[in-house]
Amino acid sequence: MNIRIQIISMIFSFVFGIFFSMFTNINYKYLFYKNIVFKVFFTFIYIIDCALLYFLIIKKINNGIVHLYFLLFIGGGFLVGLFKFNRFIDKFKYCLKNVKKRKK
């Protein structure tokens, strides 16, 4: 595999980690249903969909070759997305609060 494909794969893995973090935060609210069947169902479908999506896109990029550093980039992207997503939500709530104050 040449260096161009490896760099594209690393960038994709990092961006996928960010999206994975955002989707995990969104899926987190479904874990508090009282029905255990819904908890297991949503978690199982979420994990299968994310893994399948990653491997399908990696297969298109570099014929499905996964290296350890791709997984490290997913982890790094996940951490960046985790911290940045919370900041984004806080800023969004702050903007909504200011808009409501202006309407009054």
Image (cartoon, rainbow, N blue to C red):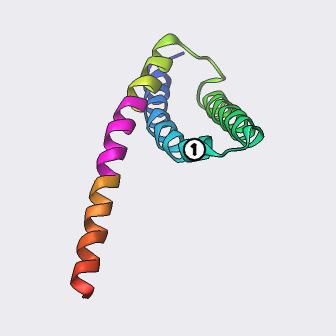
Residue 70 in percent (x, y) is at 49, 20
Residue 30 lies in the magenta stretch: no
Q: Among all residues in the image, which is located at the extreme bottom? A: 104
Q: Quadrant of residue 44?
A: top right
* In front of the other: 86 or 71: 86
Above/below status of 98 relative to 80: below
Most common SS among magenta residues:
helix
Quarter of the rendering occupied by the C terminus: bottom left
Disc 1 marks which residue?
A: 27
Residue at the (49%, 43%) spot, across then down? 25
Neighbor class of circle 1 (other Cα within 10 Å; few <14, some 14-19, many 20+) is some
Residue 5 in percent (x, y) is at 50, 25
Give the residue type at disc 1.
Answer: Asn
Which residues are drawn in magenta? 78-88
Above/below status of 102 relative to 48: below
* In front of the other: 10 or 51: 51
Circle 1 — which element?
helix
Residue 61 in percent (x, y) is at 59, 30
Residue at the (22%, 83%) spot, across then down? 102
Residue 89 in percent (x, y) is at 35, 54
Residue at the (70%, 41%) spot, across then down? 42
